[in-house]
Image: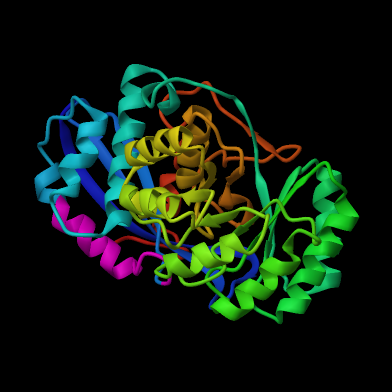
Amino acid sequence: MRIRTVTPYWISLPLLKPFKMSNITVKTTENLLVRVEDTDGNVGWGEAASAPTMTGDFPEGMVAAAQWMKPSVEGMEVEDLAGFAKRIDALIYGNEGSKSAIDMAVHDLAGKRAGVPVAELLGGVVRRDIPVLFMLAEADRVKDLAMARKKADEGFICYKVKIGTTSVESDLDRCAAVRDLLGKSVRISADANQGYNREQALQFAAGAAAAGLDFIEQPIDGHDVEGMALVAAATSVPLGADEGIHSHGDIERHHALKAAKGASLKTIKLGGMSPVMVAGKRMQALGMSVNLAGKIADSSVASAGIVQLAAALPQIDWDTSVTCQYLSDDIAKLPVTVERGHVRLSDRPGLGLDIDEAKLSSTSVKLAA
């Protein structure tokens, strides 16, 4: 297939409620949406969330990077999807988010041309029903327990407690309370988003097993791999890396230093869908657990990409984060839906959704110049 046009959009969508993390409160999404059309008139869509504290990406910069790559991608003949990710990686340094949005759009386009879900192009469907994580991010014991009870009634079986915004003692208390409420049959993790220093992380690690946690995600700065190794050695609860993973080499380093027993894979960190598949297969070989995640918050475009990856990866034993569930509005005609705590892979080709293009001219969505 030959790419005819690449059109970037800057979309802004509201969340159902503000999302409090260790160092930022998110109220709206500010994401890059990319529309790719081939010379036969077929259209594919891709998306990447801006993530200043994770990737350094602001929406203005993501749009600028997409515009920079646009002349090189337009007219490009694409025969090998994995090779396409490598080709666009060479166009500009960094800017993995922008690359991932273009890569996702080309995967969507290729799936539509072939008449199959993207998961088939990624190596084949391994699973169709995918458990979805729900994040408990109120930093308030009563509110988090109320939400956990509500989501348990809806069928969710895996949860992530956001920590690092209050005291270590309070964080441990909330985690233990969620475990006591939900019992042993669900998976519960805690994510600090780099919110602790080493001393706080060691304190949290000392109480993590008693709190009933299945894993701890990125307790300290992502650059401090040696510190991660110290924390990992101090607890029987596995550590997962997120902000510390931006390349396949980062995975190897965390494994070699025993700094993490798993990692959170995101297209915006690794530059596309094929690089995530490569990372997931390597982690399987290393015996590392995989958490597959979208950023807070994706529209249904990037969430559909996550669903396709989740359907094709060898294992996702630390579950999947589908973040369009936290939005109050979406740009898909039929958004990705979570039912009984799971998403189900669609049989529709490509990413399996259609975009409401009329919304791209609404006040909530800004067309990039």
Which image quadrant for residue 143? bottom right
Q: Main secondary structure of the magenta part?
A: helix
Give coordinates of residue 256: x percent, y percent.
41, 51
- Residue shown at the point (36%, 44%) measured from the top left: 46
Residue 173 sits above or below residue 368 on the image: below
**Quarter of the image with the C terminus in it:** bottom left
Left or right? Give the position of 261 relative to 187: left
- Residue shown at the point (81%, 61%) measured from the top left: 210
- Residue shown at the point (81%, 44%) measured from the top left: 154
In magenta segment, residue 65: yes
Give coordinates of residue 250: x percent, y percent.
36, 54
- Please provide the residue range marked out in magenta: 53-69
**Quarter of the image with the N terminus in it:** top left
Give coordinates of residue 110: x percent, y percent.
30, 27
In magenta segment, residue 52: no
Left or right? Give the position of 320 relative to 299: right
The one of 358 and 204 positioned closer to us in this rendering: 204
Residue 43 sits above or below residue 220 on the image: above
The one of 89 and 168 positioned closer to us in this rendering: 168
Which image quadrant for residue 195? bottom right
Way the structure is coloured: rainbow
**Number of disc labels:** 0
Residue 250 sits above or below residue 35 on the image: below
The one of 358 and 156 positioned closer to us in this rendering: 156
User: Does residue 10 appear in this view?
Assistant: yes
User: Does residue 369 appear in this view?
Assistant: no
Give coordinates of residue 93: x percent, y percent.
17, 59
